[in-house]
Amino acid sequence: MKTKLLLLEDDLTLSETVVDYFEEQGFVITPVYDGDEAQEIIYEKKFDLFLLDVNVPFQNGFELLKTIRNDGNKTPAIFITSLNSMASLEEGFNSGCDDYIRKPFELKELLLRVKTIIKREFSNNIDNIIKIDENIIFDTSTNELKKDDEIVQLNFKEQKLLKFFLQNKDELIIHDRIYDYVWDYGEQSSDNSLRTYIKNLRKILGKDRIVSLKKLGYRFNTK
């Protein structure tokens, strides 16, 4: 399976150069030209790595990465930018990037950085794959659920809930612990919403997988 990259770069010449080079190296690379367009496509598709310029129209690269990190997206990111101050470097890493390369750069250097991160992510993901059933797996690094090799769409809180269950398998989890984990600070937790999330997960995993213990909480069964 080919590695999928997203390139945010508003310099058309540089964008075409990077796209051509990485396609020749066997990557699938999608170019976008402003921060809003990048955010929209990130929510629609899954990528293995982001290449992000900073000074682009609408929201800049730093703002974009902060936004998607706050939404729970952990896809690795490399900033490619002409900003070369220590303050910019610090802001880039504080935004959640994995690497930072200053323009002008050699394409081979960018390729080596991309390959290094992808290799690291692949190694990490091997340990993050949890087999729930013969045909169901969950990736705790990406919160991606697959059934019969097909991705199952879960909303963000359903992803968090399933991850929490898998971290506490075969244990009674009281309601308050679930609320504290699934709902962020300042959010109003909801019994009805939790029951809906449980119902949706049971449809996918089987009704006996998540057991309700009346007035106590829930248990995720692996046996």
Image: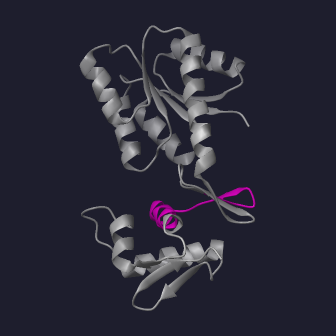
In the figure, residue 66 lies in which quadrant? top left
Q: How many marks?
A: 0
Residue 199 placement: quadrant: bottom right
- In reply to whether residue 157 is colored magenta, the answer given is yes
Q: Do we see residue 59 in this rendering?
A: no
Residue located at (57% from left, 33% from top): 120
Magenta stretch: give its range: 145-164
Q: Residue at x 46, y 46 (%)?
A: 73
Q: Can I make out residue 44 in this image?
A: yes
Magenta highlight on residue 147: yes
Left/right placement of residue 76 relative to residue 134 reads left
Q: Is residue 147 left or right of residue 183?
A: right
Residue toward you, 123 or 205: 123
Q: Nearer the viewer, residue 23 or 181?
A: 181
> Where's residue 103, x and y in %?
43, 11
Q: Is residue 208 above or below residue 121?
A: below
Q: How is the image coloured?
A: one colour
Residue 156 percent location from the top left of the image = 46, 60
Please state, as top left, top right, bottom left or bottom right, where the C terminus lies in the image.
Answer: bottom right
Up-down relation of residue 146 to residue 141 (above or below): below
Q: Relative to 196, does residue 64 appear above or below in the rendering?
A: above
Quarter of the picture containing the N terminus is top right
Q: Position of residue 53 (x, y in %)?
A: 42, 23
Rendered residue at 59%/32% (across/down): 118
| Position above or below: 101 against 162 | above
Residue under the image location 39 percent in, 90 percent down: 215
